[in-house]
Image (cartoon, coloured by chain):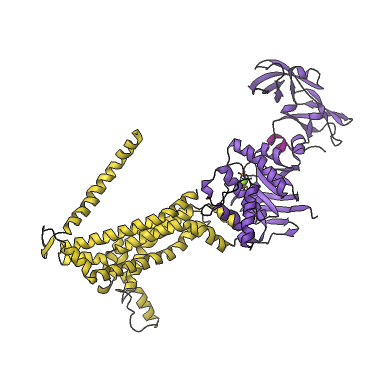
Amino acid sequence: MTDIAVDLKGVTLTYGAFVAVKDVDLKIDKGSFVTLLGPSGCGKTTILRSIAGLVTPTSGEIVVAGRLINDVPIYKRNIGLVFQNYALFPHKSVADNIAFGLKYRDVPKADIERKVKRALDMVRLPGVEKKLPSQLSGGQQQRIALARAIVIEPDVLLLDEPLSALDAHLREEMRTELKIIQREVGITTIFVTHDQEEALAMSDRIVVMNHGLIEQNGTPEDVYRMPATKFVASFLGQSNLMAGTIAATGNGSARITLDNGASIEAKAPASAKAGSKVTVILRAQRLEVGKKAANGANKLKGKIAATSYLGGTAIYAIDAEGLKLQANTIIDDQVFREGETVDIAFAPSDCVLLGEDDRRLV
Amino acid sequence: MQQTRFAWYLLAPAIILLAVLLVLPIAIMAIYTFYEFVTAGVEKANYTLANWQEFFTDSYYHLFLWKTARVAAITALACAVMGYIPAYFIWMTSFRHKWLLLLLLIVPFWISFTIRTFSWIHILGEQGAINVTLKTLGIIDSPIQMLYTEGAVIMGMIHFLLPYMILNVYVSLEGIDRDLLSAARTLGCTSAQAFREVTLPLSLPGLCAGLLLCFVLAAGSYVTPQILGGNRDALFGNLVYDTIMEQLNWPMGSTLSIVLFVLLGIVSAIYSRYMGLSTIFKGLSR
Ligand SMILES: Nc1ncnc2c1ncn2[C@@H]1O[C@H](COP(=O)(O)OP(=O)(O)OP(=O)(O)O)[C@@H](O)[C@H]1O
Ligand SMILES: [Mg+2]
């Protein structure tokens, strides 16, 4: 019980008639780094704001560090929030910005100075105490915002797309930095992003959301390799979705007749029943093209419809007898061009089956 | 280079207008201050310092200046206090049609300023709305003297200047990122503390600009004291009017106008130097 830092129980939040967050249940382990991932408007920020107390859930309970905080006013919650645009106080020096939360926690003056210094060391920006936020670069401002949030030793650190205002190069650097700092401090972190790469790279767990609902909550590997729903499969990475009907099952696998007539074999859980309609999900990276496809288990013939040459890899749009597929492969001998006919293949173990409700069969 | 020249072309009409209609008349007035006053309506171009000497030695003028500054300062401060609250309200309200509220601020400008000032006579006068009401209710026996007092003058000026104050404060409030307030709240501020730490300091540039504008406009006002004030409530602007229009003493009248012009100029200059800092703060809040 004690190792759960944040526990959302049936949290629903509506703006007028619009339901922004629907009946969300979410447990977050102490010290973990959890990412809320989803398209714009899916309710990520709303969840963060309700944990911080900036909006009040319509129903449900929010428990932080074992304390029900629904009725605790914002300023008495011990939560660190970092905004997308930093929200540093422009009229206060860096030191005053960082000291702000400490001042309102009645920390003695001498301690404040020491803690501010330590926080600046932690974000690797020593000696900028006297500067104004506007005298710092975007990345530096982001670090100050982070320092300001962690210096109060919050129960949980909430980061709302903290990297999206930075340029691509800086973003990658800050990504690593942020993860290192989070490990050092060991602070429970909820990170919001709509960038899947960021989510996969940084998280202990990823919570994929859509339309105010949680679609999947799992480790990055789980979410990537075993998408729980059609939405997760199409939102994360490039996937091929192939509709078909199960012809026969047995031995942990199923023979599936695809809608274009092709027959394939796929790994299947026990709940897969012959005669039921399924969608087969296959990552574009798992579809072999050309020579490598010669002795695959599920072998098809396809015609290259389009080629995107990326140097080390190539992305092919392939028409396999009416089935539109995408392959993202490492180029080992030759690049195929539009109009060429190629062998394609994939392994039964790389297939994930979704039932008629678009959820993974388990 | 090309661009700077183009900018000058664009500026030229405004500069020419300002030069002909503003700088030139003021320069002529400045020359007049050195003319000699012969008798009502007659002056001679004998260059003399007599007018300036009179101004610097006669305490009558100094008292007028002092009174004008006092009344203008009271007006500006009253506008600040009374204007901040509606500006804050307009900023904070979740009412969808904010533009309507802002439009309401501009509506008074659709009616002539003089007529608006006259309307106070029907409110404050002996037979005005307030006195009649109080009398009918039996609260007073004889009408209270409200019109033709300094209070009435200040009231009239507040009435005319308040929209300027509200708009100035509103504009600077509108520039404040609301996430700053959320940040302050999550860091431990109550909403009152967040107002003191964030909203107030970041809206100071607008408040200061409003104060300056109200002070200068009040100090230069002439119509309001003329209509709503008694003889004792005349301000410096009325003194200038009297000197020129009643005594027909153009040299002295010019001297007094130049004095007011220079003093208000100095106030604005000092103020904007000091304000320069706040403007930087405002620029910082991006
Ligand atoms: N104050 C509000 N009033 C009405 N609707 C709101 C309000 N705030 C958010 N919404 C709506 O709630 C939904 C969820 O908003 P939220 O900000 O949580 O999305 P998000 O997942 O953070 O999106 P983004 O990635 O764009 O930041 C959106 O559709 C938004 O339009
Ligand atoms: Mg958001």
Query: Quick check: A23 above or below B77?
Result: above
On the image, the x and y values in percent for residue B130 come to 37, 75
Which quarter shows the N terminus of chain A?
Answer: bottom right
The one of B171 and A347 positioned closer to us in this rendering: B171
Residue, x 74% and y 35% (percent of image)? A224
Query: Quick check: B244 above or below A298?
Result: below
With A44 as the anchor, is A88 left or right in this view?
left
Q: Seen from this angle, which residue lies furthest bottom? A: B141
Numbered marks: total: 0
Q: Seen from this angle, which residue lies furthest right? A: A251
The one of B25 and B141 positioned closer to us in this rendering: B25
On the image, the x and y values in percent for residue A286 come to 75, 27
On the image, the x and y values in percent for residue B163 come to 39, 60
On the image, the x and y values in percent for residue B267 come to 33, 60
With A147 as the anchor, is B238 left or right in this view?
left
Task: Let me know if residue B246 is in the magenta part.
Answer: no
Magenta-drawn segment: A228-238
Instruction: Name the tint of chain A in the rendering.
Output: purple
Quarter of image, res B271: bottom left
The one of A227 and A280 positioned closer to us in this rendering: A227
Residue, x 72% and y 46% (percent of image)? A183
Query: Quick check: A304 above or below B262?
Result: above
